[in-house]
Image: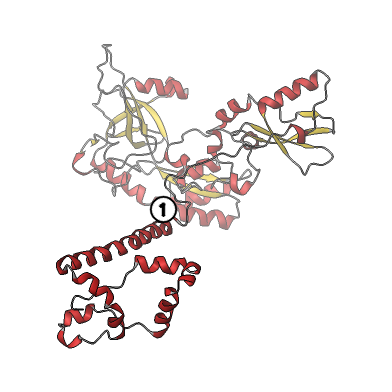
């Protein structure tokens, strides 16, 4: 049996182990909560009065709700599927609210107590089977109804179809720009579907709420998720927020202005109350200037001369108020270019260094410098360790370096293979000529870098020299 979550009568959505014969006991936590769910914050509080509230709120398909009276004192809770009174026949719905909160909802929606209908019983198995079979036929009926309306030539769009719980009535929700004469249409529908026909016109925003979709912000439409009342939105709302009047950007999927334009309107009106009027004009020595732009966040106003409106000058609202006070006293203010103060640049620190494109190169350069500084130290340490074991032979090795440079492979036959690999390779003639040039004391002064280079990188010493 379906608990009525998500869409009433849809058996595809189940509540798992919590589903009972009376419905879903925790309809808001089973994962299939509906749009107009209400949190009963009085559910764990006992009623101090002796008499218990017998009013119940019942929801039907989409966002349709109504209030009923529990005349038989049936134990009901949120999620119970009940059979209620209707005309003609009966309807099947899901209990969405019980207790004292129902009276508050009725008072909020101004629901008359005289028109309250009654609850017959909890829905039995036969009621649920008829209810679910009627729900399955709604899609095919909607497509057929659109074909009939198009054949007759009516300028209307059938948005949704709702069957009554006992299949004795069909309600067609449609949208149209102009008035529609559907007397012939009702005859066609009655002959095709063999039931009572009820036509109900809705607005384009209600249509978007029933169909649903994704907005330009990337989230689900507010009207299809949580928004219940549709306040009027006009172009003045966009003007207060300093938005360009572009219908393509300001219109939603319903073709009307977006409902979210009203969300921050109060904050903008509060901020604009501290601003001078946008129609303010300033009398300067150079001529009259008018306000051309307002920045609510920076609290600035841009002014330009009437004669030359290409140059704009921005001022804080505190300064503008002082200038207006001077004009009221009959004094002309200085030209705008003289009043304009240079903006002090704001220094920002990029802690993450995301905007620095050379951040990786700098690290590599530092690592290369550290490696270059470690190389001569390693060579000197190796030379020192080799020279400690040989003692007085250290000076003789330095005197024998030219001979070793001339014949580097003279004693190659007496050395093992590992030592042969460590021997320095014979230098080409170009390099030997450079070393001879650097030995001249006059040329050493001209090339100090080469002299330091030889100090930092001494030639490797041969152990068997």
Residue at x 35% of width, y 30% of height? 38
In the foreground, 352 or 254? 352
Q: Quadrant of residue 167?
A: top left
Is any part of residue 111 visible from this angle? no
Residue 344 drawn at (x, y percent): 61, 37
Please state if 317 lies on the left or on the right of 208 as rendered. Answer: right
Q: Is residue 388 left or right of residue 167?
A: left
Q: Residue 450 location in percent, x, y?
A: 43, 69
**In the drawing, does residue 334 fall left or right of residue 101?**
right
Q: Which residue is mark 1?
A: 139
Q: Secondary structure at mark 1?
A: helix
**Residue most toward the top?**
49
Q: Relative to 88, is 251 above or below?
A: below
Image quadrant containing the N terminus: top left
- Can residue 275 be seen in this snapshot? yes
Left or right for 117, reference 78 = right
Q: Nearer the viewer, residue 378 or 88?
A: 378
Observer-nearest of 169 and 13:
13
Reply above or below: 243 against 402.
Answer: above
Q: What residue is at 85 percent from the left and 33 percent from the top?
A: 287
């Amino acid at each position: 049996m379906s608990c009525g979550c998500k869409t009433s009568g849809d058996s595809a959505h189940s509540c798992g182990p919590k589903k009972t014969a009376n419905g879903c006991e925790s309809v808001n936590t089973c994962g299939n909560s509906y749009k107009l769910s209400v949190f009963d914050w009085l559910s764990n509080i006992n009623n101090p009065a002796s008499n218990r509230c017998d009013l119940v709120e019942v929801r039907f398909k989409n966002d349709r709700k109504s209030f009923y009276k529990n005349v038989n004192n049936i134990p009901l809770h949120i999620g119970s599927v009940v059979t209620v009174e209707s005309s003609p026949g009966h309807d099947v719905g899901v209990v969405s609210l019980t207790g004292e909160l129902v009276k508050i909802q009725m008072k909020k929606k101004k629901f008359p107590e005289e028109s309250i209908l009654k609850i017959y019983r909890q829905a039995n198995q036969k009621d649920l089977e008829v209810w679910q079979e009627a729900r399955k036929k709604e899609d095919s009926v909607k497509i057929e109804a659109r074909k009939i309306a198009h054949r007759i030539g009516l300028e209307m769009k059938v948005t949704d179809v709702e069957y009554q719980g006992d299949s004795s009535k069909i309600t067609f929700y449609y949208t149209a720009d102009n008035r529609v004469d559907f007397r012939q249409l009702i005859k066609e529908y009655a002959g095709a579907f063999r039931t009572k026909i009820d036509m109900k016109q809705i607005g384009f925003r209600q249509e978007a709420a029933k169909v649903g979709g994704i907005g330009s912000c990337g989230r689900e439409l507010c009207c299809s998720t949580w928004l219940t009342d549709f306040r009027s939105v006009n172009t003045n709302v966009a003007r207060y927020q300093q938005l360009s009047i572009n219908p393509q950007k300001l219109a939603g999927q319903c073709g009307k202005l977006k409902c979210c334009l009203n969300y921050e309107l109060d904050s903008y009106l509060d901020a604009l109350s501290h601003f001078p009027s946008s129609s303010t004009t300033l009398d300067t020595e150079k001529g009259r200037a008018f306000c051309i732009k307002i920045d609510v966040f920076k609290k600035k106003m841009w002014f330009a001369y009437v004669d030359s409106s290409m140059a704009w000058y921005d001022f804080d609202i505190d300064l503008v108020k002082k200038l207006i006070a001077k004009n009221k006293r009959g004094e002309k203010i200085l030209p705008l270019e003289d009043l304009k103060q240079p903006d002090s640049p704001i220094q920002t620190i990029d802690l993450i260094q995301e905007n620095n494109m050379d951040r990786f190169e700098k690290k590599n350069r530092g690592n290369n410098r550290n490696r270059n500084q470690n190389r001569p130290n390693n060579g000197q340490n190796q030379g020192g360790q080799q020279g400690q074991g040989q003692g007085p032979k250290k000076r003789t090795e330095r005197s024998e370096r030219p001979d070793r440079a001339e014949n580097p492979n003279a004693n190659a036959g007496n050395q093992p293979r590992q030592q042969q690999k460590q021997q320095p390779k014979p230098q080409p003639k170009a390099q030997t000529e450079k070393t001879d040039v650097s030995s001249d004391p006059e040329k050493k002064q001209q090339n100090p870098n080469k002299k330091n280079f030889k100090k930092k990188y001494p030639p490797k010493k041969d152990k068997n020299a």
